Image (spheres, coloured by chain):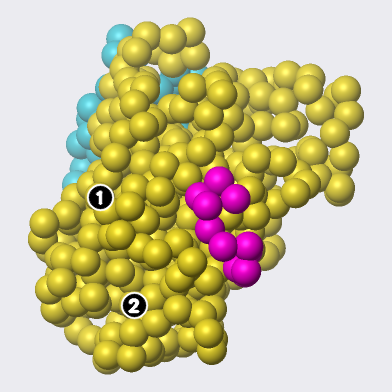
């Protein structure tokens, strides 16, 4: 998966509207970044990358690219 | 992990009782936006729950369930030798509730009465305890009543619990029966997680004070006081993912059964997303996973017997089918049990 495709999936799953999301987007700036979003990201990582990430790891992330790094940058094209 | 096998006892019947009052998740409120509610329902699966009226306690629901079970199975009340009430929402701090139920149900005064304080893994520990009682000499029938009125301990403005939990009760009759198939049980405790699901004040560690009732605002926007339930959802989720599938696989190994020999997997109804993840990890067919969380939410220790009565009635009674039950929650504790349904004569769900 390309990073752009991952961002599209993130936006779609979290139902983010009216905001341009990039790797540098601060998660805390998104109204949609809540406990349901954490579960959605865990599902994306598991279903698309077969990578297990924990809710506590996601508690510490600041930027969208931190999630990409948690999944593993090498997983992306 | 602690594992055991109990022979010579069987579950004869289960009656669950839920309040008539339905609380819809998508009802408009000031805490969650419509979009948040929609996503919550999509992920957790919780469309509605049952809440008691203010003057109804967990033991009242338990009373209705037990009374119906005793009536329908036409049980001589003097033949019930022990009653166990398992709940986190008892009537009083003192005295305990099972002795109140002994009187209310009209049971003999010559009876063992016990209360157990346990959460979402409680049905497994309650079964283990009641089955070991039923193994004792001169004890024939044991009544296990699990009951919760979670609605009474929630803050409506708490973002991790207010939409999650529901009320209900279940009465389970356990009886000595020499020809019963063995029951396999695993019980486990991880006490370092004791603060992850907690009501901080009101016990003797933090006695109730005027500050206990102060509403506090938390990082996620939740507002609650220290006499209300708090849950660190992330920690609980990670704990569940770490232990439950593994525990189920180990319990199957211990029993000698293969996973395909279980007709249904009745997991604690914590969250549809979590139940499906555990099912995926174990490689289970979706139709073997029992899910009733859409109708009742998370009813703590009641969820497993409630799911058996709501979704398996007419399918398993007096058959040779095996069920795998698994509970996990406050403590943090977790456990699984494998039961055979041959001696199970009666399943019922009532609204009260």
According to the picture, the residue beneath numbered tag 2 turns out to be: B10
Span colored in magenta: B103-113
User: Which secondary structure class fits the magenta region best?
Assistant: loop
**Helix, strand or loop for disc 2:** strand
Whether residue B64 is situated above or below residue B171 in the rendered picture:
above
> For mark 1, does the 10 Å Cα neighbourhood hold few (<14), some (14 to 19), or many (20 or more) residues?
many
The chain carrying label 1 is B
Whether residue B33 is situated above or below residue B208 in the rendered picture:
above
**Dot placed on the residue nearer the N-terminal end, 2 or 1:** 2
Q: Which mark is residue B348?
A: 1
Shade representing chain B? yellow
**Helix, strand or loop for disc 1:** strand
Locate residue B8, reporting x and y percent: 37, 88
The chain carrying label 2 is B
Shade representing chain A? cyan
Q: Which mark is residue B245?
A: none
Quick check: is B152 in the magenta stretch?
A: no
> Which of the two residues, B336 or A52, is positioned nearer the viewer here?
B336
Using the rendered image, report if marks 2 and 1 lie on a common chain: yes
> For mark 2, does the 10 Å Cα neighbourhood hold few (<14), some (14 to 19), or many (20 or more) residues?
many
Quick check: is B111 in the magenta stretch?
A: yes
Left or right, B323 with reference to B111: left
Look at 56% across and 24% down and name the residue there: B55
Q: Is residue A67 visible?
A: no
Left or right, B174 with reference to B41: right
Locate residue B191, reporting x and y percent: 67, 65
């Amino acid at each position: 998966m390309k990073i752009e495709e991952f961002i599209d999936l993130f936006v779609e799953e979290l139902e983010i509207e009216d905001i341009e999301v990039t790797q540098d987007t601060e998660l805390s700036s998104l109204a949609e970044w809540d406990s349901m979003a954490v579960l959605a990201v865990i599902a994306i990582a598991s279903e698309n990358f077969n990578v297990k990430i924990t809710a506590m790891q996601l508690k510490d992330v600041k930027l969208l690219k931190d999630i990409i790094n948690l999944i593993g940058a090498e997983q992306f094209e | 992990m602690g594992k055991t096998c109990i022979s010579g006892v069987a579950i004869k019947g289960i009656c669950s009782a839920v309040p008539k009052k339905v609380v819809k998740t998508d009802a408009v409120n000031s805490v969650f936006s419509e979009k948040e509610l929609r996503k919550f329902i999509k992920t957790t699966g919780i469309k509605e729950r049952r809440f008691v009226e203010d003057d109804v306690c967990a033991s009242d629901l338990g009373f209705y369930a037990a009374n119906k079970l005793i009536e329908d199975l036409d049980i001589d009340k003097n033949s019930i030798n022990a009653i166990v009430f398992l709940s986190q929402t008892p009537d009083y701090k003192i005295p305990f509730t099972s002795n109140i139920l002994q009187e209310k149900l009209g049971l003999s005064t010559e009876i063992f009465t016990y209360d157990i304080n346990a959460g979402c893994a409680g049905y497994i520990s309650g079964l283990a305890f009641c089955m070991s009682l039923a193994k004792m000499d001169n004890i024939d029938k044991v009544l296990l009543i699990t009951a919760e009125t979670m609605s009474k301990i929630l803050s409506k403005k708490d973002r991790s619990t207010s939409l999650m939990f529901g009320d209900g009760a279940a009465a389970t009759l356990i009886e000595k029966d020499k020809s019963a198939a063995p029951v396999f049980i695993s019980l486990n405790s991880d006490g370092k997680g004791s603060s992850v699901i907690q009501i901080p004040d009101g016990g003797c560690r933090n006695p109730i004070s005027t500050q206990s009732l102060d509403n506090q605002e938390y990082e996620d926007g939740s507002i609650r006081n220290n006499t209300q339930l708090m849950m660190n959802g992330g920690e609980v989720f990670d704990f569940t993912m770490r232990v439950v599938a593994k525990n189920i696989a180990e319990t199957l190994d211990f029993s000698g059964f293969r996973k395909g020999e279980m007709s249904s997997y009745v997991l604690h109804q914590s969250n549809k997303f979590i139940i499906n993840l555990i099912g995926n990890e174990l490689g289970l067919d979706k139709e073997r996973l029992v899910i009733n969380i859409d109708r009742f939410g998370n009813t703590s220790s009641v969820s497993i017997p409630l799911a058996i009565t709501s979704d398996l009635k007419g399918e398993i009674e007096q058959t040779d089918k095996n069920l795998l039950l698994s509970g996990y929650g406050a403590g943090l504790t977790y456990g699984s049990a494998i039961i055979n349904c041959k001696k199970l004569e009666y399943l019922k769900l009532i609204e009260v």
